[in-house]
Amino acid sequence: MNEAHALETSDLPELLPWAEICRRYPDQWVALVDIVWIDDTDEFSAARVAGHGPKRADPLTQARRFQSRFEEIGHFFTGRVRAPALGLFAP
Amino acid sequence: MTVRRFDPTDDLIIVKARVYGPRGSRPLTLALDTAPSHTHIVPEVIDDLGYSPLQGEAITSVRSAIGKEPGYMLRVARFASFGFSFSDFVVHVHDLPEGIGIDGLLGLSFLKRFNYEIRSAEGRIIIEHATT
């Protein structure tokens, strides 16, 4: 990391691997910025948590302060994905 | 040909996608679902991207697990998944239950452009763009 990048990122949340994000914010929605994507996959190795909360909208609202700096804001759930008991759509 | 992995122990087949709008892009998590004709995205994400229901092309109503949900059809600037991207892509914007951990459904409006193989036990999807 060069000095300019260090200064730019000094006021940002720390860069964390996904496993650590899940550990710190269990069963929450998170908004991620500065996502480090792994080439040719849809996976990422690390990101900064710009917002988090139990409701889907919570992290997006919190992450708005970063919108001028990051065009890309990821929105993910740290808990287990669960299918609704009645299915997603009623017949 | 593209191969993506998913967790075969999950209740749903989870894939990543990306929606673009006036305020940038939002990588998110969708459930791959061959039942719905459209790709569904929850309104929180669409609103955050800077779209408005006033831009909707049609008002809709869906019977879901949480009741009869109003929604609308919206043409987003770009939509991408599996490394493939489409401009002016129409999505169905409506709510989904909060606690299931997804931002929507990757439906046939996207999938019908591809040939794909879902290897559920292996947790792999093999997908290639249809040439015709």
Image: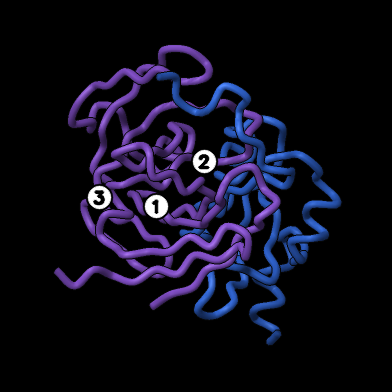
In depth, the one of B128 and A16 nearer the eye is B128
SS of the residue under disc 2: loop
Decide: is B97 above or below B112: above
Q: Amino acid at mark 3?
A: Phe
Residue at position x 39%, y 52% in the image: B19
Quarter of the N terminus of chain A within the rendering: bottom right
Q: Could you tell me how far apart the alpha carbons at marks 1 and 3 are, in whole angstroms?
A: 9 Å
Task: Determine which quarter of the picture holds residue A56.
Answer: top right
Q: Circle 1 marks a residue in which chain?
A: B
Task: Place residue A45 in its image quadrant.
Answer: bottom right
Q: Quadrant of the C terminus of chain A?
A: top left
Chain B on-screen colour: purple
Task: Identify which amino acid the numbered label 2 is placed on.
Answer: Asp
Residue at the limit of the structure toward the bottom, as seen here? A2
Residue B89, label in figure:
3
> For the residue carrying disc 1, how many other residues have a C-alpha within 10 Å: few (<14), some (14-19), or many (20+)?
many
Q: Position of residue A5 (x, y in %)?
A: 65, 78
Q: Residue furthest right?
A: A23
Question: In terms of depth relative to the viewer, which is nearer, A80 or B124?
Answer: B124
Q: Marks 1 and 2: in contact by CB < 8 Å?
A: no
Seen in the picture, residue B11 relative to A8 is either above or below; the reply is above
Q: Which numbered dot is residue B103?
A: 2
Q: Is residue A52 left or right of residue B102?
A: right
**What residue sits right under mark 1 in the picture?**
B19
| Side of A37 where A23 appears, left or right | right
* Residue kind at label 1, given as amino acid type: Val
**Dot 2 alpha-carbon crowd within 10 angstroms: few under 14, some 14 to 19, many 20 or more:** many
Name the N-terminal-most of marks 1 and 3. Answer: 1
Residue A88 in percent (x, y) is at 50, 28
- Of helix, strand and loop, which one carries label 1? strand
